[in-house]
Image (spheres, rainbow, N blue to C red):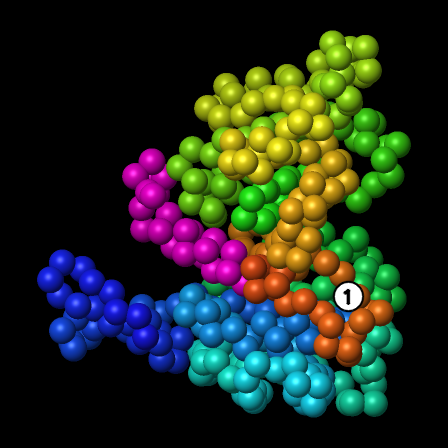
Amino acid sequence: MPVLFCGPAPMRLNMRGGRASFYINGEPSILKQLPCMGITMGDPAGIGPEIIAMALTDRMLYESCRPVVLGDGVVLSDTILRLSEKGLMAREMTVNPVSTPAEAVAKPGVVDLMPLSNLDSGVITPGRPVVAGGKAMVDYILRAVDMAARDEIQGMVTSPISKVLMHQAGYKYDGHTQLIAQKTNTKDYVMMLAGTKLRVVLVTIHCALKAVPELLDQAGVYKTIVITAKALTEDLGFSRPRLAVAALNPHAGEEGLFGIEEQEIISPAISQAREQGIDVEGPFPADTLFNRAAAGRFEAVVCMYHDQGLIPLKLLHFSDAVNVTLGLPIIRTSVDHGTAYDIAGTGRADPSSLKAAILMATKMAENRAVLARNPDPGTRN
């Protein structure tokens, strides 16, 4: 273990049972309970079980949080066995069924699992979604929301689901975000996609491109700016985040020649946000903005539509981007990819996005805990 020094007294950090124990001159001085992250399995027939098993071989995750999986025991055990037979597991792993997060052992090599479904091996085949799996994947989400609301877990991290399968299971939502927002009685929320170099936030999300101009209004752009600024401060720890807003039209409309949305909608929303003390600039032409943002000029870019933000984001962070729902009373992060049925069961799935999502949720939980102790963001790091 690393040896840390603080003044003349050597400090040693031990990890045991999800607690970080600090020792000075051999004597325990601090005992800290790490935040618990509830990881939902997603569709059991997708790559969710695989990326969970692979991600939880990483010792680094256990140094920052206590991961607990909400899913199916048979599916997870079969997945670990299959990956082991392919030589794709970095360490030997066992599944530890628990009824509450408090029972988790939280150590590498052991997957603490809350078994919320009982899907037989014959029911679930990787790459072949079935309604029974769809009902189970929604149950995992609903249970995680309830646990987060009761602070049994300090954040939820969601693995990929199928929106079509969700509908077939009887839940008529567009996806995770809308379901979680309804269950937490959240009216105003926005989607952020984040990597280490670039963060983008969307004013409109899943809609036809031709519908975007009609969906944009000053209130929506303003709301997105305000929620983003608040989350960057309270959840991600920036004392005064710098935001940029992308224009909708080429050349930011060229003074109305290529469109009037910048003059009539976007610029007034920016001015309104500035009046509230938010550090926000724009609207900037999108073709030059993202280079500046990725270079560190802005903490986030507010984008007018889905592909405007996700193309540059995935160019830089195709494997490790994180989907974050801002504005919720609970913490929710997610992988930034789908169920990948075409490669499910092959061991080719990349767990990088899931690991990044777990670490981001942990950071958000830590920042919220700091804020609860010290509500003045100006005095925080």
Visible residue check, residue 144? no
**Quadrant in the rendering for residue 197:** top right
Which residue is at a point 65% across and 81% down the rendered structure image?
A: 88
Q: Is residue 209 above or below residue 143?
A: above
Q: Is the magenta stretch mostly helix, strand or loop?
A: helix
Q: Is residue 254 magenta?
A: no
Which residue is at a point 72% across and 32% down the rendered structure image?
A: 304
Q: Does the magenta stretch include residue 367?
A: yes
Where is residue 285? Give x, y as percent.
Answer: 69, 23
Which residue is at a point 82% across and 15% down the rendered structure image?
A: 258
**Quadrant in the rendering for residue 163:** bottom right
Where is residue 361? Give x, y as percent.
Answer: 52, 58
Q: Which amino acid does label 1 sit on?
A: Thr
Q: Name the residue under label 1.
A: 339
User: Split into 4 quadrants, where in the image is the C terminus?
Assistant: top left
Report the span colored magenta. 358-381
Q: Nearer the viewer, residue 246 or 41?
A: 246
Q: Number of marks in the image?
A: 1
Which class describes the residues within 10 Å of circle 1: few (<14), some (14-19), or many (20+)? many
Q: Which of 310 and 91 is in front in this view?
A: 91
Which residue is at a point 69% across and 41% down the rendered structure image?
A: 312
Side of 371 where 298 appears, left or right: right
Where is residue 42? Give x, y as percent.
Answer: 71, 69
